Image (cartoon, rainbow, N blue to C red):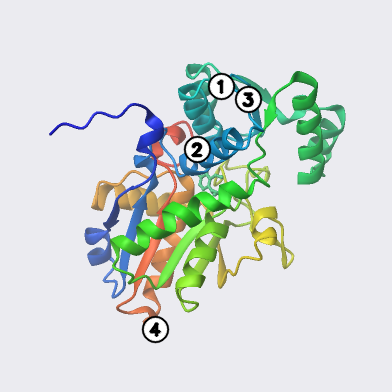
Amino acid sequence: MGKIYKSITELVGHTPLVELTNYEAKHELKATLLGKLEYFNPSGSVKDRAALSMIEEAERTGKLKPGQTIVDNTSGNTGIALAAFGHAKGHEFVTFLEPGVSKEREDIFKAYGVDQYWFTDISPRVKEACETGALNITVLEEDVQAYADKNGYYYIDQCSNEFNTEAHYQTTGPEIWEDTDGKVDIVVLLAGTGGTISGLSKYFKEKDENIQIIGVQPDVYSRLDANNKTGNTIDGVFPIEIGGNVIIPLVNKFNSKIDEIIDVSAEDAYSAAKELVRSDGIFLGQSASAALFAATKVAERPENAGKNIVIIMADDGTKYLSTNLYK
Ligand SMILES: Cc1ncc(COP(=O)(O)O)c(C=O)c1O
């Protein structure tokens, strides 16, 4: 029997979990590395889950009216997903981009017919905060909300929207659990809004508090705002904590347990990515590459021999071809 879907909204999730078999052998790892290939989602990233979950909740509760335009501040993947599922469900999408995102992302938004602006266009006070490096999430959210109210748009607010977390609690976590028959020891991932890490932490800690959640963050030289001379950054993600304080609202809101945080440099992430595409033919984006590098270090620890380490591979390399990732 054939199977014909009615909408891309039916294709979100159920992404494959694949063992990095050749890479493990090359590194003589005694732990198992399992990549959760989130780029199998219809718009190409882990953010499809959050976008669909947030849109459907807003439609269900009447916060988002039929045909109403959606707006959000997103440096890429969430915006692409909101545009894709928005259009599939009859909504336009307007985005505010974080300065520094890769050229491919702007081009993709153009292709999706999205109106795109920069953070600096939101309001004079956000512009000033961007220029002085003093931008905080509260100011950003207040001013995007004011913009949405003025224009009659719905501000979906991925950074504080609990249905971002819920998407991973309801889908990503259970998929990993089923595909490993419950044999999960460690989960390694980065955070942007923190939706994935807060959802997975909640899910796995409820299953078994010994399952370790390892957060990975770009080191201080590899953040989008680092202004380093190499231009090597890990895009689409943020530090989880700065100076010992967790800075991601959803992680704080859900009081998420993160067992360890590992700093990774862009250079280490890029070299892990170059290796994996040659060893196993898996073509990663920047955050997935950083997760791979960190997971390799975790796998090398003697106490982790025989353990299953799941790596969230948020997107693939196509959006980063203009960066130094594969150069
Ligand atoms: C490439 C990439 N990796 C990881 C993430 C982190 O996802 P989350 O927003 O769920 O923390 C994002 C988005 O924010 C992303 O675009």
Determine the CA span between mark 2 and mark 1: 12 Å
Of helix, strand and loop, which one carries label 1?
Answer: loop
Which amino acid, mark 4?
Answer: Glu
Disc 2 marks which residue?
Answer: 52
Determine the CA span between mark 2 and mark 3: 15 Å
Where is residue 75 drawn, in percent x and y?
Answer: 60, 35
Q: Name the residue rendered at 50%, 68% in the picture.
A: 213
Of helix, strand and loop, which one carries label 3?
Answer: loop
Of helix, strand and loop, which one carries label 2?
Answer: helix
User: Which residue of the protein is positioned furthest toward the front in this rendering?
Assistant: 61
Disc 3 marks which residue?
Answer: 65
Q: Which mark is residue 303?
A: 4
Determine the CA span between mark 3 and mark 4: 53 Å
Q: Nearer the viewer, residue 52 or 108?
A: 52
Q: Which mark is residue 91?
A: 1
Which amino acid, mark 3?
Answer: Lys
The quarter of the picture where residue 303 lies is: bottom left
